[in-house]
Image (cartoon, rainbow, N blue to C red):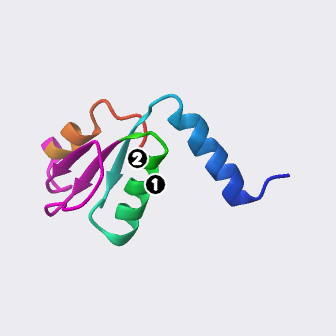
Amino acid sequence: MQSFPDTIHSILIDMASRRKRVLVVGANGFIGRALTSRLVSLGYHVVAASHSQCHGISASQIRTGDLRDARYCRRITRDVDII
């Protein structure tokens, strides 16, 4: 039986093989940067969303804006498989 982290890793690898588009909100923060980097290394198309400018993030797309703005939220979630 696989441990919990191994199971999650297997699921992520399987989903990446389908080239899913993932939105990471808060991509400029500590956890968001680590998650974005990991998802990109697994082959995901990552859309990074942040309130401030992102520097040094290896996402496929970077979207800067305010989550309180409904138009911004619609724009960043369009054509995304996983949030």
Q: Amino acid at mark 2?
A: Val
Query: Please, is residue 33 above or below residue 13 in the view?
Result: below
Compared across the picture, whether 17 is left or right of 77 comes to right
Query: Mark 1 belongs to which amino acid?
Result: Arg
Residue 75 image position (x, y, % from top left): 19, 38
Q: Residue furthest right?
A: 1
Q: Which residue is mark 2?
A: 40
Residue bounds of the magenta highlight = 46-71
Marks 1 and 2 sit apart, C-alpha to C-alpha, by 5 Å
In the image, what residue occupies the spot 28% across and 50% down? 48
Residue 28 lies, in percent from the top left, at: 26, 64
Q: Secondary structure at mark 2?
A: helix
Who's the residue at 19% across and 62% down the image?
55
The answer to whether mark 1 and mark 2 are in CB contact below 8 A is: yes
Q: Quadrant of residue 31?
A: bottom left
Residue at (15%, 53%) from the top-left corner?
A: 64
Residue 38's tag is: 1
- Residue 21 painted magenta: no
Circle 2 Cα neighbour tier, 10 Å, few/some/many (<14 / 14–19 / ≥20) = some
Q: Which mark is residue 64?
A: none
Q: Is residue 15 above or below residue 9?
A: above
